[in-house]
Image (tube, rainbow, N blue to C red):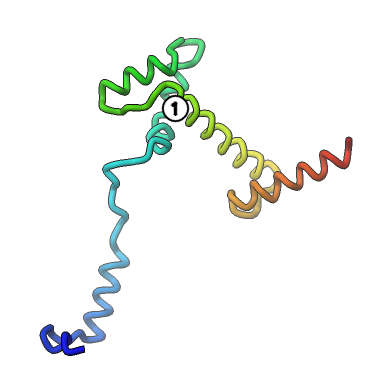
Amino acid sequence: MGEQNNSELITKGKIDKAIELLKEQKPKEREDVSDRDAVRKMRRYIEKLTSDKYGYTYDEVSEMLKGLGINLTGSRIKYLIGELKKSSRRRQKASDNGGGSTLENGAIENQSGVTASSTGTR
C-alpha cells in the first residue's frame, strides 16, 4: 500500500485519457502464425497448383514451401486443406438453412435439424 507514495497521483482525467489511448490500439500483426492459418492464407494457390490443370502433388508444393523455410509435409497440407473445406462446407450449410444464429452454433443446430428431418423421412 505504501507504493502509491513513490509514484505521482493518478487523476480521473489521466485514467480517462489512458482508457481512450488503450481503446484506440489496433491488434498487433503477428509474425508467427499456425500451420492451419498459413495454409488457410495459401489455400487458393495450393488448390490451383494441385488441380488437374496444373498437376502438382502436395509433396511438390511442400518442397516449394520448404525452400522458403515453411516446413509442412505434403500430407499435412492435404489434411489441412481438407479440414478447411469441411469447415467452409459447414458454414455454407448453416447459411443455406437460414443461419440467423452465429456460424459455430448455427452449424451445430442446423446440422442436428437436418439429421432429424432426414431420419424422419426415411
Q: Residue at x 29, y 46 (%)?
A: 30
Would you identify the image quadrant in which residue 77 lies? top left
Give the total number of marks visible in the rendering: 1
Indicate left or right for 34 with 31 as reference.
right
Percent coordinates x, y for residue 49 in the rendering: 43, 17
Spot the residue most to the left.
Answer: 6
Percent coordinates x, y for residue 105 in the rendering: 62, 52
Q: In what quadrant of the picture does the C terminus appear?
A: top right
Indicate left or right for 17 with 102 as reference.
left
Q: Is residue 28 above or below residue 44?
A: below
Q: Which residue is drawn at 43% across and 18% down?
A: 58
Tag 1 secondary structure: helix
Q: Which residue is drawn at 66% across and 48% down?
A: 108
Q: Residue at x 70, y 47 (%)?
A: 110
Percent coordinates x, y for residue 89 in the rendering: 61, 35
Q: Nearer the viewer, residue 106 or 61?
A: 61
Percent coordinates x, y for residue 98 in the rendering: 69, 48
Neighbour tally class for label 1: few under 14, some 14-19, many 20 plus, Cα within 10 Å: some
Please, what is the three-letter code of the amino acid marked with disc 1?
Answer: Arg
Q: In what quadrant of the picture does the N terminus appear?
A: bottom left
Q: On the image, numbered disc 1 is attached to which residue? A: 76
Indicate left or right for 8 with 117 as reference.
left
